Image (cartoon, helix red, strand yellow):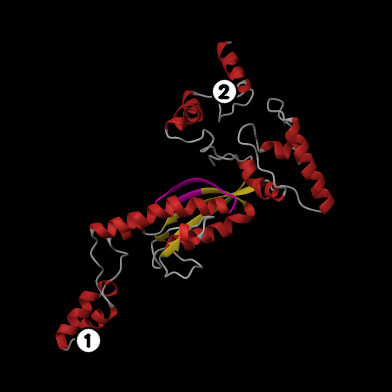
């Protein structure tokens, strides 16, 4: 009885930045994950309690539709499942009724779609996982540049055109990989750090996606179905440092909405690096564990 009273009260009086559905019960681990950031840690690091909340899969799937109707879901009391309960043919959850204000907005969007001959919201979304190729080889120096490429071209040609055995020996030495150094590791760490902090999350957001994780050469994100392939393409190009700007390959202006002069130019992995991505398409109700 005490537990039931506690959870009913939590649903009626939510802690700021959190939400508990009627009838929902959380174990100790889930309780800490749900409430610790919003109720305790956010203030300590000067962030808003809702900053690190993830959109649910229904909202991700329907995002292009919501954007077309210029509707931004509220930060607090919102469930993407309401979209399909009102617009689609999904039975409403008696423990999570759609608020009247939200219902009226969604019905207005549905009528507008019918009048314009537009399709309703998609029920499917994409999960993308991107990972840098041969990163162990890069770290060990097996993928690094040859010594010849690290010299000025005139200096490399000078050694290679030495007469006789000296020239042959110079050519052999210059074909070897450049030895790994602390500076090489530091540059690579900086490139991957900038990619995961300043590039990948911004590109995912630009494609209406939800970045779940970006660290080093790894990216995991949820995206609307019709934006996923374009997002993967941009993520792969950015990993190398390929851009439309007038910059050498391996250099990239940080993406964002600021003026060009306010966006730093980043050093990325370069043209000989690559990243592979996998893409899965799922219904918004599918179990994320699968």
Mark 1 residue element: loop
Query: Looking at the figure, which quarter contains the N terminus?
Result: top right
Q: Residue at x 65, y 34 (%)?
A: 78
Residue 29 or residue 267, whichever sits in front: 267
Q: Which residue is mark 2?
A: 25
In front: mark 2 or mark 1? 1
Residue 284 or residue 227, whichever sits in front: 227
Residue 206 or residue 282, whichever sits in front: 206
Q: Residue at x 71, y 47 (%)?
A: 121
> Which numbered dot is residue 161?
1
Residue 151 image offset from top left, x and y in percent: 26, 74
Number of other residues with Cα within 10 Å of mark 1, as a class: few under 14, some 14 to 19, many 20 or more: few
Residue 143 image offset from top left, x and y in percent: 32, 64
Q: Is residue 80 in view from this perspective?
A: yes
Give residue 150's quadrant in the image: bottom left
Marker count (numbered)? 2
Q: Is residue 284 in view from this perspective?
A: no
Give residue 77's quadrant in the image: top right
* Magenta segment includes 127: no
Residue 208 or residue 281, whichever sits in front: 208
- Asked whether, in this view, residue 7 is left or right of residue 157, the answer is right
As drawn, which residue projects farthest toward the top? 1
Query: Looking at the figure, which quarter contains the C terminus?
Result: top right
Mark 2 residue element: loop
Q: Residue at x 29, y 55 (%)?
A: 186
- Asked whether, in this view, residue 14 is left or right of residue 111, the answer is left
The magenta-colored residue range is 207-220
* Magenta segment includes 209: yes
């Amino acid at each position: 009885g005490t537990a039931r009273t506690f959870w009913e009260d939590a649903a009626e009086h939510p802690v700021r930045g959190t939400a508990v559905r009627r009838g929902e019960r959380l174990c100790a681990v889930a309780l800490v994950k749900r409430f610790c950031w919003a109720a305790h840690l956010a203030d300590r690091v000067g962030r808003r309690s809702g900053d690190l909340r993830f959109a649910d899969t229904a909202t991700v799937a329907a995002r292009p539709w919501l954007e077309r109707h210029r509707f931004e879901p509220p930060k607090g009391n919102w469930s993407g499942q309401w979209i399909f309960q009102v617009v689609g043919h999904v039975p409403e959850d008696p423990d999570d009724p759609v608020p009247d204000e939200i219902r009226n907005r969604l019905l207005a969007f549905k009528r507008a779609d019918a009048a314009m001959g537009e399709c309703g919201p998609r029920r499917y979304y994409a999960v993308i996982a991107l990972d840098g190729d041969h990163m162990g080889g890069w770290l060990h120096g097996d993928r690094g540049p040859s010594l010849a490429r690290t010299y000025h071209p005139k200096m490399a040609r000078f050694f290679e055109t030495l007469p006789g055995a000296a020239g042959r020996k110079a050519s052999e030495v210059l074909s070897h990989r450049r030895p790994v150094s602390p500076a090489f590791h530091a540059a690579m760490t900086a490139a991957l750090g900038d990619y995961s902090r300043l590039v990948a999350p911004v590109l995912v957001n630009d494609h209406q996606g939800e970045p779940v994780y970006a660290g080093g050469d790894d990216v995991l994100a949820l995206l609307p179905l019709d934006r996923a392939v374009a997002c993967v393409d941009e993520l792969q190009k950015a990993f190398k440092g390929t851009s439309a700007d007038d910059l050498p390959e391996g250099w990239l202006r940080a993406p964002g909405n600021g003026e060009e002069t306010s966006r730093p130019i980043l050093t990325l992995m370069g043209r000989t690096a690559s990243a592979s991505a996998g893409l899965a398409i799922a219904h918004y109700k599918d179990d994320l564990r699968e």
